[in-house]
Image: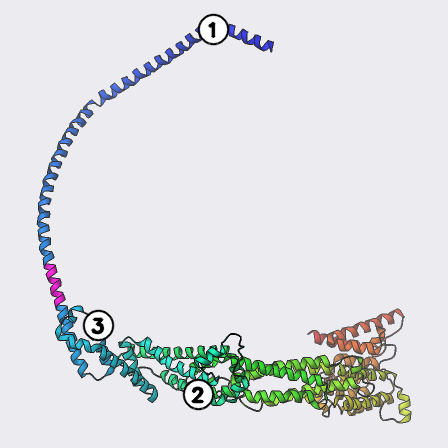
């Protein structure tokens, strides 16, 4: 701190204020001198410029003085012009006043002329009104008269007072006549009267009120009819008060039975309203207005008639919907008789059903509106019918009586009644078939759940057990239901409509699918048993058969007995003929194919043994007789059987030479199997080369029906034989090996090409 203070004192002692002031004054003097020099330079330049431009500046000054004089002259001229305009304005104001007076006189004159014209027109209208007889023309004149009578100046004329006072009475009289004319036109179906009345309504500006009045007349009739149908009685005032006293309980005074007891006698009033509606709307829709003078009037009448019809139908439909929604007693009473009610409704509106399931009538639009009003009734009836059908299915399966088609018969009783009642109307019939379709699906589902597919239901060793009998009865019930429904579809052309057929076809296909699924496990067991019997062919002792002089092999006799027993005990009880015939045909075809496979793999060199095997072909045909009486219907499988039989007695080279006889019938792999079986035992069978059993190899062939796969397998087997022969240092192949290899290559080339 002491050092800092000492430094400050030393600085203050060295600072000279006088020198500092003089230095500042000197700097300011230098700045002032420099500014003075610049000012003098600028003034010098300005003097030089003025001296150079002096003449031009003088001319400009003189011009400014001349311009000032011109401006003064213009101002004086404008003042003179303003005075003249003021004088003209006064003259124009005078002329404008005179013109305004003339205009007022002209307006008054025009009003007088127009009043005179209106007076003349009104007098002419009054005169023509007395002489005109056409109500449309009179209404048009009356409209003009009423328009002219609104003129207050004319109303002040005493000469017109009597005529003007008659106009309201004349209008009321004309309205009454037009209403009478409209009613006469509806009653007598006179289009001219309807057109005249409607045009009169238009001329008198009462179209909306008359439409409302016409609709109200039918609405009141409908309400009265509905009150009679529902037995609605208006209570007396005293009874009403007594009924609503405190502490009393209100119970419905009417029941469904009370309404149903007098239902159809009271419904006659309702159908009378519908009959009137149909008659009048059908006629109104045919009114075209072509007999009127102008096309616009005809178009107006046509559109008004359509609007009148649809307005009326919409109001009536709304009343019907409200009534059915609010009155559950009436809805319940009509529900059971819905088909009869719809039939009466259709006959009232003259509805006819076309062949394609559609309805036709001249007044289809009003009918559709009224019919839609009863949608809640039809929904209630369809729901009741569906519940009844489904309940019948549930009850049928609760009984657990499956014999004699009890399930299907019980359900078909309800179906027949439902279809018979619904035949009166196409829409009801379609809904009925939809309900039947749902019931069939439920029936099929219950049968599917009841069918057993375990080992007990698929055994074929002993006689049919209780599970197999039950499955058979369930399938027979489904078949009976299927046939009964198809019979109903074919009874009537209306029932056989394409729409209805499409509704039920899906359910019938589902029923058929369930039947197939129920039978398929049993048929698969039969196929397995047949395959096991044919597999014993390779253990057959043909020497003992020849020694005993038996006509058929042991395996063939077993196959004959098995197929006969299967057909009698297991397949014949099924009543679905078409389905079982298909399964029998499938079993016969598969038996033929498996028999040929096993025969082609059988290594028999002795001719006597081959003769025995050829005899088995005839025995096989006898064995297949229970499955298929006409073996030619088996198609290609039976042709192969016939073509393959003589090849067993030929030599390998002879078989190849007869290629033209078998190449289009017998598969190439089957011929190669036959040639291998005819060869020396050194050439192993295809299954032996893979160390498979014959049964496994046959299963592989069945799962690989493509000839290319089979030929490639045989090619691999032959290549394995060739390698084993080379490895064993044998001198040559078996004699048939080159023949088989060449034929194999030809077959592969044909398939590849």
Query: In this figure, what is the number of numbered marks?
Result: 3
> Closest to the observer: 588 or 229?
229
Residue 68 vertical placement versus 6 (above, below) = below
| Structural distance between the alpha carbons of marks 1 and 3 | 119 Å
Q: Residue at x 89, y 70 (%)?
A: 729
Does the image show residue 299? Answer: no
Mark 3 Cα shell of 10 Å, populated few (<14), some (14-19), many (≥20):
few
> Closest to the observer: 430 or 392?
392
Q: Quadrant of residue 336?
A: bottom right
Q: Earlier in the sequence, mark 2 or mark 1?
A: 1
Q: Which of marks 3 and 2 is nearer the N terminus?
A: 3
Left or right position of 278 against 466: left
Does the image show residue 108? Answer: yes
Q: Give yes or no for contact between labels 2 and 1 (Cβ–Cβ under 8 Å).
A: no
Which one is in front in this view, the residue at disc 1 or the one at disc 3?
3
Q: Quadrant of residue 138?
A: bottom left
Colour convention of the picture: rainbow
Residue 37 vertical placement versus 190 (above, below) = above
Q: Residue 84, how many percent across, how many down? A: 9, 43
Left or right position of 550 against 126: right
Residue linked to disc 3:
147
Q: Quadrant of the C terminus?
A: bottom right
Left or right position of 140 against 440: left
> Which residue range is magenta in the image?
102-112
| Structural distance between the alpha carbons of marks 2 and 1 | 138 Å
Which one is in front in this view, the residue at disc 2 or the one at disc 1?
2
Q: Which of marks 1 and 3 is nearer the N terminus?
A: 1
Residue linked to disc 1:
16
Mark 2 Cα shell of 10 Å, populated few (<14), some (14-19), many (≥20):
some
Q: SS for tag 2?
A: helix
Residue linked to disc 2:
269
Which one is in front in this view, the residue at disc 3 or the one at disc 2?
2
């Amino acid at each position: 701190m002491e050092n800092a203070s000492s430094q400050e004192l030393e600085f203050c002692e060295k600072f000279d204020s006088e020198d500092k002031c003089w230095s500042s004054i000197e700097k300011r003097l230098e700045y002032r001198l420099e500014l003075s020099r610049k000012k003098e330079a600028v003034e010098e330049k300005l003097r030089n410029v003025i001296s150079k431009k002096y003449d031009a500046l003088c001319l400009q000054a003189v011009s400014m003085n001349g311009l000032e004089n011109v401006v003064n002259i213009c101002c004086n001229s404008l003042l003179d012009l303003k005075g003249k305009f003021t004088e003209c304005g006064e003259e124009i104001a005078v002329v404008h006043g005179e013109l305004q007076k003339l205009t007022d006189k002209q307006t008054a004159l025009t009003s007088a002329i127009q009043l005179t014209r209106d007076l003349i027109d009104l007098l002419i209208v009054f005169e023509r009104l007395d002489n005109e007889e056409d109500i449309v023309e009179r209404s048009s004149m009356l409209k003009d008269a009423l328009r002219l009578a609104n003129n207050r100046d004319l109303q002040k004329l005493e000469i017109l007072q009597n005529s003007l006072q008659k106009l309201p009475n004349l209008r009321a009289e004309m309205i009454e006549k037009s209403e009478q004319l409209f009613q006469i036109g509806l009653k007598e179906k006179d289009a001219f009267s309807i057109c005249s009345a409607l045009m009169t309504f238009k001329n008198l500006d009462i179209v909306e009120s008359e439409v409302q009045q016409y609709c109200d007349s039918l609405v009141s009739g409908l309400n009265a009819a509905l009150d009679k149908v529902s037995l609605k009685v208006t209570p007396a005032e005293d009874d009403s008060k007594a009924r609503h006293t405190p502490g009393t309980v209100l119970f419905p005074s009417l029941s469904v039975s009370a309404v149903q007891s007098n239902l159809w006698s009271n419904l006659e009033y309702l159908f009378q309203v519908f009959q009137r509606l149909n008659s009048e709307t059908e006629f109104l829709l045919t009114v075209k207005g072509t007999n009127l003078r102008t096309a616009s009037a005809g178009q107006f009448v046509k559109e008004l008639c359509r609007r009148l019809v649809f307005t009326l139908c919409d109001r009536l439909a709304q009343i019907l919907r409200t009534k059915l929604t609010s009155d559950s007693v009436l809805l319940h009473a009509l529900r059971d008789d819905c088909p009869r009610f719809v039939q009466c409704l259709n006959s009232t509106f003259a509805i006819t059903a076309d062949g394609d399931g559609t309805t036709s009538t001249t007044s289809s639009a009003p009918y559709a509106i009224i019919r839609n009003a009863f949608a809640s009734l039809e929904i209630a009836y369809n729901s009741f019918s569906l519940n009844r059908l489904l309940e019948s299915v549930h009850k049928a399966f609760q009984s657990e009586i499956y014999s004699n088609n009890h399930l299907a018969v019980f359900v078909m009783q309800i179906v027949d009644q439902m279809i018979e009642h619904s035949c009166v109307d196409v829409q009801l019939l379609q809904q009925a078939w939809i309900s039947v379709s749902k019931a069939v699906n439920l029936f099929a589902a219950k049968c599917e759940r009841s069918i057993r597919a375990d080992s007990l239901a698929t055994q074929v060793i002993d006689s049919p057990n209780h599970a197999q009998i039950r499955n058979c009865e369930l399938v027979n019930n489904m078949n009976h239901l299927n046939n009964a429904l198809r019979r109903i579809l074919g009874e009537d052309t209306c029932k056989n409509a394409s729409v209805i057929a499409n509704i039920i076809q899906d359910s019938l296909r589902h029923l058929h699918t369930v039947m197939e699924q129920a039978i398929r496990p049993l048929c698969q067991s039969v196929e397995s048993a047949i395959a096991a019997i044919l597999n014993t062919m390779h253990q057959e002792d043909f020497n003992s058969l020849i020694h005993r002089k038996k006509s058929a092999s042991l395996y063939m006799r077993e196959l004959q007995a098995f197929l006969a027993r299967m057909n009698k005990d297991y397949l014949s009880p099924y009543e679905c003929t078409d389905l079982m015939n298909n399964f029998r045909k499938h079993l016969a075809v598969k038996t033929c194919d498996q028999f040929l496979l096993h025969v082609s793999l059988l290594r028999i060199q002795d001719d006597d043994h081959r003769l025995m095997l050829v005899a088995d072909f005839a025995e096989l045909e006898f064995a297949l007789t229970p499955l298929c009486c006409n073996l030619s219907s088996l198609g290609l499988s039976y042709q192969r059987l016939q073509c393959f039989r003589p090849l067993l007695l030929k030599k390998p080279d002879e078989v190849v030479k007869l290629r033209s006889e078998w190449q289009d019938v017998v598969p190439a792999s089957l011929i190669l199997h036959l040639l291998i079986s005819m060869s020396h035992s050194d050439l192993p069978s295809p299954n032996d080369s893979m160390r498979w059993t014959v049964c496994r190899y046959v299963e592989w062939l069945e799962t690989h029906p493509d000839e290319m796969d089979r030929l490639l397998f045989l090619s691999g087997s032959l290549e394995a034989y060739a390698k084993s022969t080379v490895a064993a240092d044998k001198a040559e192949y078996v004699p048939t090996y080159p023949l088989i290899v060449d034929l194999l290559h030809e077959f592969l080339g044909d398939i590849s090409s």
